[in-house]
């Protein structure tokens, strides 16, 4: 039976996909982009008001959910016995992907292009690395439980492969320049990354909840004994 935490990746995918296409529709209606001149980049659609405000909110909310998903996945892989270094590398790549997404939403292309492109690099390329690392873990550690149908892992492999190919094509086409084709690749990569995040719902299907546990540091002294325990110790000594 699937737990409620499995809804978080699904909601993230739905939120992000519907949000960016809503921004696209508003950009077309408000004539911020002209489809007769070419297919626009995602960032171009979200660079002009009023859709720029919606674009920022959509990506910030999506980044927050993605970061929370990465933290949950980190603790899940840790409990499954994944090595500390590899697990931390996976966590860092996921957090950088979420941070880059937030940067893309807050620093529009027309105002802060270098910062915007840096955020796009983290969101796309490091985000793809996040899922490749998880595939590496699943292939190397055969003892890890593989929830879901048997075709889930080949599907992830296919999505990651297509995502990587399209990212390379996006950069090459942009430099030629074939901007409309490059923009189409960018939209496809974004949809694939959203789908990969949504597939994490399969991994979270066995999670019923999460608990925060605080452990005292080694330098902290143990708590003083209660009066009741002292009375018991004295009575035993007498």
Image: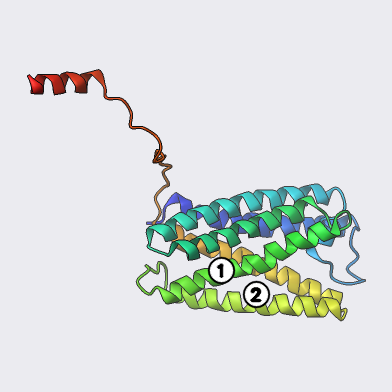
Q: Label 2's element?
A: helix
Q: Residue at x 60, y 79 (%)?
A: 161
Q: Nearer the viewer, residue 111 or 233?
A: 233
Tell me: residue 63, above or below residue 139.
above
Indicate left or right for 185 with 208 as reference.
right
Q: Which residue is mark 1?
A: 131
Could you tell me residue 165's position as x and y percent? 67, 80
Q: Residues within 10 Å of mark 1 (few under 14, many from 20)?
A: many
Q: Residue at x 76, y 61 (%)?
A: 118
Q: Residue at x 62, y 49 (%)?
A: 64
Could you tell me residue 39's position as x and y percent? 84, 70
Q: Nearer the viewer, residue 59 or 18?
A: 59
Q: Which residue is mark 2?
A: 163
Indicate left or right for 50 with 127 as reference.
right
Q: Is residue 193 visible?
A: yes
Asked whether the beta carbons under mark 2 and mark 1 sit within 8 Å of each other, the answer is yes
């Amino acid at each position: 039976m699937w737990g409620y935490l499995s809804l978080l990746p699904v909601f993230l995918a739905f939120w992000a996909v519907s949000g960016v296409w809503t921004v696209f529709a508003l950009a077309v209606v408000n004539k911020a982009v002209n489809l007769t001149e070419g297919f626009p980049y995602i960032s171009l659609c979200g660079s002009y008001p009023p859709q720029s405000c919606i674009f920022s909110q959509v990506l910030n909310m999506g980044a927050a959910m993605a970061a929370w998903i990465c933290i949950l996945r980190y603790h899940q892989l840790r409990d499954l016995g994944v090595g500390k270094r590899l697990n931390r590398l996976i966590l860092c790549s996921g957090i950088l992907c979420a941070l880059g997404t937030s940067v893309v939403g807050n620093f529009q292309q027309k105002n802060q292009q270098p910062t915007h492109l840096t955020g796009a690099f983290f969101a796309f390329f490091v985000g793809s690395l996040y899922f490749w690392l998880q595939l590496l873990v699943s292939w190397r550690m055969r003892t890890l439980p593989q929830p879901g149908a048997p075709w889930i892992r080949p599907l992830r492999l296919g999505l990651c492969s297509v995502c990587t190919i399209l990212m390379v094509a996006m950069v090459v086409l942009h430099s030629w320049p074939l901007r409309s084709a490059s923009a189409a690749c960018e939209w496809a990569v974004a949809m694939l990354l959203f789908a990969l995040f949504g597939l994490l719902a399969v991994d979270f299907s066995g999670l019923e909840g999460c608990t925060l546990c605080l452990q005292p540091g080694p330098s902290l002294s143990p708590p003083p004994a209660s009066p009741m325990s002292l009375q018991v110790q004295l009575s035993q000594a007498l």
